[in-house]
Amino acid sequence: NIEENFQFILFGGTGDLAHNKIIPAFYNLAAKDILPNQYTIIATGRRYDNKKEYLDALYNSLVNKKGKVDNRIWQLLADHIDYFQLSFKDDNDFKRLKNNLENKAKKEKVSDRIFYLATAPNFFAEIAKKLKSFGLLDVALENNKARLVIEKPFGHDFKSAKKLNDTLTNIFSEKNIFRIDHYLGKEMIQNIMVIRLSNPIFRALWNKDHIDNIQIYLNESEGVKDRGKYYDDAGVIKDMFQNHILQVLSLIAMEEPENLTAKEISDKKVEVFKELADNDLSNIDRHIVRGQYDSEQVDGEKINSYQEEKGIDPQSKTATFLALKLFLNNERWQGVPIYLKSGKRLNKKEAAIAVEFKDDFHSAYLDQKNIDNNLLLIKIQPEEGVSLRFNTRKPASNNKIIPVEMEFCQSCQQFFNSPENYEGLIYDMIAGDKTLFTSWEEVCYSWKFIDKIQAKCEEENITLHKYPALSQGPDAADKLLETDGRSWLDKD
Ligand code: BG6
């Protein structure tokens, strides 16, 4: 349980994230009775005129999301929520906010202040500066307990990320900056370390001698929805690769940490990001497939092409799909291809990590080697679980080998309710545990790698393949693996 009383100041309190992720996560924490007796969520925004209107709107969003809300739990939570009308541009509002926080702090003996920036990214630096210049950090800083939580995107390239980071670290110490990557809040992503480090059967084989290839795919069926303006600048490479996919890769590929402290894990992840950033990308034209979704008729209904979506330039060349083959030049992974893939408007939402083993058979069975390889599949979503493919003797046969699959479905367990991604993250930011947040160094080297890919793609004028909405993506992505004698493991 969280013991320390805290103030949680939510900038962007009336936005989507607050309604659909942050407040529902608090609701779940309240239901589990792990919040202290005294805490306040001070949501700032402009949209609503008063607290009642705001709480009504939050309640409606919660009902929409959950279907059913326990009114007793909601009331427990609502008693701790305050609404504060504030414009980021108005200095006076920050002065009023400071007084408000201080008056509350006197009554409630608050020791921690958490400032959560769930706003458009162009406000991140400005808000942080005002927190300092208007004295909102003064009280809390006595114990060095003021924390800043910052949503993605953290910059739009290395240069802008560094500039933002310099501003933030002038105000907060790295220890108190929590950069969110909500994939790290997912159950099966947190499971990677346990699967890797606590199972001798995987731990002993986790290297180039036994692993043939690794695939990570984060496929989405939705389009860009109403985020066209942001997405057209970002594209899949900044939206999904720079953060989520590289984070997952770093956990799969890193060297074993000596312990599970946030610093040690981050250091090991950074080694992977550095190696990626050192990649010379000289074969990029043969190792990358860029795509953009086109319109399609599905069940008599037209699905818009990317270029027809709201907020998108009708001539846009932004990639909504990317497949990438890469190598890590270190002792553990030398020569093992790593295939990464993510796209919008694919035929289904499905995210998983596939670790395919080599066909290292005893000589007695060499003649049967052309069957499917042993495979460890870590299923991230929608189903959460693990499946393992291995070989057995075909019943009543003459020692004929057949691959079989063993399934563990975590999300199918009776009474199992997968926690919201944000639930654990919010718990950790209140408790001050940074393990599931990204350090500056991780962000820094991941941007360097992404910037390099972007520059290479432009330099070499890499083709943008159109793919029909709700399809499996461009055929070129299949060819990427076919030329290596392999295929994507997400194919039915
Ligand atoms: C976000 C991206 O970070 O992750 C979105 O900005 C994407 O474009 C989303 O849809 C995917 O998250 P999840 O949890 O639905 O896989």
Image (cartoon, rainbow, N blue to C red):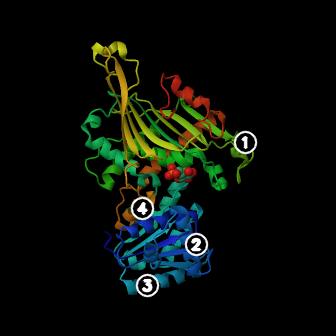
Name which residue type carries label 1.
Gly
- Secondary element at image label 4: helix
Nearer-N-terminus badge (2/3) = 2
Instruction: Categorize mark 3 by other alpha carbons within 10 Å: few (<14), some (14-19), many (20+).
Output: some
Closer to the camera in the image, 70 or 210 = 70
Q: Which residue is mark 1?
A: 300
The mark nearer the N terminus, 4 or 1, is: 1
Dot 3 or dot 1: first in sequence order is: 3
Mark 2 CB lies closer than 8 A to ligand 1: no
Q: Nearer the viewer, residue 382 or 132?
A: 382
Q: CA distance from mark 4 to mark 1?
A: 40 Å
Say which label, 4 or 2, has the lower sequence index.
2
Badge 4: residue crowd in 10 Å (few <14, some 14–19, many ≥20): many
Q: Amino acid at mark 2?
A: Ala
Picture coordinates of residue 161, whole percent (x, y): 52, 55
- Residue placed most toward the observer, 38 or 166: 38
Tag 4 residue: 423
| Element at label 3 | helix
Mark nearer the N terminus (2 vs 1): 2
73 relative to 422, above or below: below
The residue at the point 26 percent across, 40 percent down is 199
List x then y, in percent, for residue 290. 61, 36
Query: What's under tag 3, amino acid-wise?
Result: Lys
